[in-house]
Image (cartoon, rainbow, N blue to C red):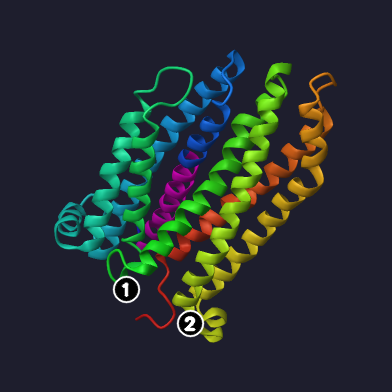
Amino acid sequence: MNDGLLGVLRLAFVALQNLGFAVVVGVMLSDRWLARSTSTWQVGVSRRLVGALRIASVGTLLSSTFAFWIHCALMSESTLVEAWPAVRSMLVETGFGHAWFAGAVLMSCVVVLSFMQTGKSIRFVPAIWLALAGVALARSNGGHPVDAGAFSLPVWADWIHLLAISAWVGLVLVTTYIVAPRFFNAPGSERVNSAAYIQSLSDAATLALVVLFITGAYNGWRGVRSPEGLLESGYGQMLMLKLALVFVAAALGGHNRFFEMPTLLASLKNVSSALPVKPLKRFAAVLHVESVVLAGVLVVAAVLVSSPLPGAS
C-alpha cells in the first residue's frame, strides 16, 4: 500500500466511526421514546434497536482502532505490519494517543454493555450515556480544538457539537431504517405512541440543529478566522461543503415538520381512522433523502478532522 491509499482508508474508517457513534446515540434516544409504552410491537422494535446498538458499537470501536493504526503508520512512514512501534510510541508519549486510548476504553465499555442487554428496552442507560459522553470528549481532545489546551473552551464547544450532530444524524438513520418501517404494522393501540415518537424526533432534531449552528459558527470562526481562509484553504472549502449539506438536511427536516407532520400526527392520534399510509410513506421518503445527505455530512466531517487548519504548516 502507498500513503495515498492509506490516507483514503484512514478517512473511510473515521467516517465509519462517525457513522457508528451516531447510530449508537440514535438508538439510545429512540429506545427511550418507544419504551414510554410497553407492548409486543414495542418490544419487537427494541430488540432490533439492541441489535443495531451491538453492531454500531462494535463497528465504532473497530473503525477507531483501524483509523488510529493507519494514522500511526502514516506518521512513521511505515507499513501497517511494521507500525506497532509507532503505535506504542503514540500511545505512551502523545496526548493524541492518550485521548484515543481513553476513548477506546470507554467505547469498549459500551460494547460490553450492549451485549448484556435483556428485557423490553435497553438497560444500563446512565452508564452507556456516561461512556458515550466520555468517548465524545476524548475525540474532541484528540482533534484541532486541543491546540487551545486540554479541556479548553474550544474542546467543550467541539464536544457539544459532536454530540448534537450525532444525535441528529443518528436519530434520522435509526428512524429511517429501523423504526419507521415498523410503523406500518403497528397495532392501533401503538399509533399514539408512534405519533409521540415522531414528535420527539422532530423536537430533538430541531434542538440539535440550533446547537449545531451555534457551536459550528464558533468552531468555524476559530478555525478559519478570515474570508480568505474560508475561500482559499482546503479546510475552509470542506467546511462550506459541510454547511451546505447541513442546510439541505435542515430544509428536508423542515419540510417534514411543517408540511407532512401535521396531517400525519392528526391521523395517527385518531385511532378510529384507517392507518395514514400515504402520509407515512411521504414522511419516510423525505427521511430517506435526509439520511443520505446527513451521511455525506459525516464523510465531510471525517475529512475536516484530518485537514490542516488555514495557516498551519
Q: In the structure shown, which secondary structural element does the residue marked by tag 1 occupy?
A: helix
Q: Position of residue 21 (x, y in %)?
A: 44, 44
Secondary structure, mark 2, is loop
Say above or below: 271 vs 213.
Answer: above
Q: Amino acid at mark 2?
A: Arg
- Determine if the magenta segment contains residue 140: no
Distance in Å between CA atoms under marks 1 and 2: 15 Å
Q: Residues within 10 Å of mark 1 (few under 14, many from 20)?
A: few
Q: Is residue 296 visible?
A: no
Q: 261 or 313, which lies in front? A: 261
> Given the image, on which type of amino acid does mark 1 rest?
Ala
Residue 177 image point, x, y percent = 61, 34
**Of marks 1 and 2, which one's residue comes earlier in the chain?**
1
Q: Nearer the viewer, residue 74 or 250?
A: 250
- The answer to whether 246 appears left or right of 78 in the picture is right
For residue 4, which numbered disc appears in the image?
A: none
Give the quarter of the figure containing the N terminus: bottom left
Q: Residue at 50% across / 35% down in the picture?
A: 27
Q: Main secondary structure of the magenta part?
A: helix
Identify the mark at residue 225; answer none if there is no mark: 2
Is residue 43 visible in the rendered image? The answer is yes
| Residue stretch in magenta | 3-23
Q: Between residue 272 and residue 22, name the one nearer to us.
A: 272
Q: Residues within 10 Å of mark 2 (few under 14, many from 20)?
A: some
Q: Measured from the top left, where is residue 2 in percent x and y?
A: 35, 60
Name the residue: 39% across, 22% down.
Answer: 117
Q: Give me the residue at 77% from left, 50% from top.
A: 255
Residue denoted by label 1: 148
Residue at figure coordinates x 61%, y 36% from the top left: 175
Q: Quadrant of the C terminus?
A: bottom left
So how many labels did they put on this image?
2
Q: Is residue 173 left or right of residue 103?
A: right
